């Protein structure tokens, strides 16, 4: 179930800048959280979502080894994974089952999240400007292409293309046992088909493309959406990213360079940090110009006020974080926002928990903020959900937007800091419990960083949009909550999730009723 907070008043108390872009809908999946509400609860009671890779993904014993000379082995089997990544309700979207099976599961996940973001924005039943809606997503290889083309590789091995021919007489039988390609398969091999299929399912006619800037990909997709909205190339954008890891290739490769934690923990800025835990996740944001959102009466989670992007340029090796490149992206973001860097009360760091990356990032923040700025809080969500690579920036952005919207900064899991003096010099504090936003009375502002393997960095500056207080309802209810699903089991599951949300988050019932009423009715219904 997606967020069920109320749509806001169209009357705002803050000045509307021409380039401000409103976040009006969000949807996400991260380990331990199937939706935005669950994600927020997880962040405020942070528990690392790290487990051993199940054999349903791959036989981990085959690849687990401490032998550094074994070039196809990993020294850990700990990851942060999403459950049920193969599940997809193709019939709901009118997609033939065979075609759905051929789609990259990352693309299928984006379809579900695009629908939930549209629902969260309150647009599903009333409609929106599909003619001017773009879909911009970050996608990279999940291993699905390799799995889909396995029969082709096996035939190449059989034919001796990579050396000696396979001589075991049972080998041709093994080749035939692996699924081959068919007429619908090619679309599953092309990453652009993720956003393109979202555009097809929801009949959207703006730009639609996938990009890859590695670990900064999700934020880069949002940045490109902001640029497109500001330029008038579209009026609405669905932007985000997805990362699944369906084969052991990335785990093995990142172990080969020592980036993965041997201890099975991710401790950004921690004294015992030894790398990150590889993770999965996805998120989609619904964006539109702030002026349009206010005119339509949309609920505004927060405003994207500044965007900064940069690449490291010429560097030796290209694998180590570069302070100059990170600083360039951050300075561009605050220049774009027309704000001093110390204007933000919270910074969501890239925070990989590596002994190389964290000191560079702390040094950059110290140089950016100078010596006399106001104090701020610092966090990094990778401690809880791992490093989701292409979706890592989205994990940090959704967390930060929720913090700005709700006025609470989530804590980091408890750990010992590695460089307390460096953080003190930058006037940065790592919260250990949910903390009310500093400086009440000022707009809540935060910065979010993501730095990609290969040198492309992105920083976004997000700001609260303070709406006028809603007038209280003339009475306390009753309020009609309408639910629907395709089948009875789905309806029961939906009702349980709603009950948990009402009990745990206590959103205003009038707002919940309004949001639910804006969703398209399905066959099974409950009020």
Image: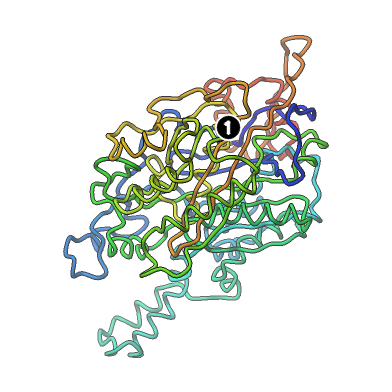
Q: Residues within 10 Å of mark 1 (few under 14, many from 20)?
A: many
Screen quadrant of the C terminus: top right
| Residue drawn at (79%, 35%) of the image | 294
Residue receiving disc 1: 404
Q: Position of residue 376 (x, y in %)?
A: 47, 32
Residue 108 located left or right of residue 250: right
Q: Nearer the viewer, residue 62 or 120?
A: 120
Q: Position of residue 29 (x, y in %)?
A: 51, 44
Q: Nearer the viewer, residue 98 or 1?
A: 1
**Number of numbered tags placed on the structure image:** 1
| Residue drawn at (36%, 65%) of the image | 249
Quadrant assignment, res 43: top left
Q: Nearer the viewer, residue 134 or 419?
A: 419
Q: Position of residue 292 (x, y in %)?
A: 80, 42
Q: Nearer the viewer, residue 45 or 169?
A: 45
Q: Position of residue 243 (x, y in %)?
A: 48, 55
Screen quadrant of the N terminus: top right
* Element carrying mark 1: helix
Outermost left residue: 67
Quadrant assignment, res 426: top left
Outermost top residue: 475
Q: How is the image coloured?
A: rainbow
| Residue drawn at (37%, 80%) of the image | 154
């Amino acid at each position: 179930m997606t967020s069920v907070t109320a749509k806001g008043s169209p009357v705002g108390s803050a000045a509307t800048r021409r380039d401000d872009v409103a976040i009006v809908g969000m949807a996400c999946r991260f380990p331990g959280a199937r939706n935005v509400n669950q994600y927020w609860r997880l962040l405020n009671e942070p528990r690392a979502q790290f487990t051993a890779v199940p054999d349903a993904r791959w036989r981990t014993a085959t690849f687990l080894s401490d032998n550094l000379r074994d070039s196809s082995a990993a020294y850990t089997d700990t990851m942060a994974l999403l459950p049920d990544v193969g599940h997809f309700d193709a019939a709901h979207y009118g997609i033939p089952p065979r075609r759905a099976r051929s789609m990259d599961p990352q693309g299928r996940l984006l379809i579900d999240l695009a629908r939930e973001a549209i629902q969260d924005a309150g647009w599903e039943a009333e409609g929106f400007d599909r003619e001017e809606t773009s879909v911009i997503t970050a996608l990279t290889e999940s291993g699905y292409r390799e799995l889909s083309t396995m029969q082709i590789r096996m035939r190449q091995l059989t034919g001796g293309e990579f050396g000696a021919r396979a001589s075991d007489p049972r080998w041709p039988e093994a080749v035939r046992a692996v699924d081959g390609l068919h007429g619908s398969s090619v679309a599953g091999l092309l990453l652009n088909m993720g956003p393109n299929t979202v555009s097809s399912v929801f009949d959207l006619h703006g730009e639609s493309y996938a990009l890859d800037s590695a670990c900064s990909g999700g934020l880069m997709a949002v940045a490109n959406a902001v640029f497109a909205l500001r330029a008038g190339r579209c009026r609405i954008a669905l932007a985000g990213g997805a990362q699944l890891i369906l084969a052991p290739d990335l785990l093995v490769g990142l172990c080969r360079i020592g980036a993965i934690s041997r201890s099975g923990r991710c401790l950004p800025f921690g004294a015992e940090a030894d790398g990150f835990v590889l993770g999965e996740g996805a998120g989609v944001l619904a964006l539109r110009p702030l002026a349009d959102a206010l005119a339509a009466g949309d609920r505004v989670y927060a405003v994207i006020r500044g965007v900064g992007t940069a690449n490291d340029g010429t560097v030796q090796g290209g694998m180590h974080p570069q302070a100059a490149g990170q600083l360039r992206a951050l300075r561009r973001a605050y220049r774009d926002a027309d704000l001093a860097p110390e204007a933000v009360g919270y910074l969501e760091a890239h925070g990989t928990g590596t002994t190389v990356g964290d000191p560079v990032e702390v040094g950059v923040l110290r140089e950016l903020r100078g010596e006399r700025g106001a104090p701020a809080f610092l966090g990094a969500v990778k401690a809880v959900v791992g490093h989701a690579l292409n979706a890592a920036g989205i994990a940090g952005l959704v967390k930060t937007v929720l913090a700005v919207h709700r006025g609470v900064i989530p804590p980091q899991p408890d750990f010992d800091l590695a460089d307390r003096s460096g953080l003190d010099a930058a006037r940065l504090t790592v919260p250990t419990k949910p903390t009310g936003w500093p400086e009440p009375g000022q707009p809540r502002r935060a910065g979010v960083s993501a730095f990609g393997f290969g040198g492309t960095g992105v920083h976004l500056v997000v700001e609260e949009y303070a709406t006028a207080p809603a007038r209280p309802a003339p009475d306390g209810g009753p309020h009609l909550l309408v639910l629907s699903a395709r089948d009875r089991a789905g309806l029961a599951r939906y009702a349980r999730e709603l009950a948990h949300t009402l009990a745990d988050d206590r959103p205003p019932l009038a707002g919940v009723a309004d949001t639910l009423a804006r969703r398209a009715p399905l066959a099974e219904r409950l009020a």
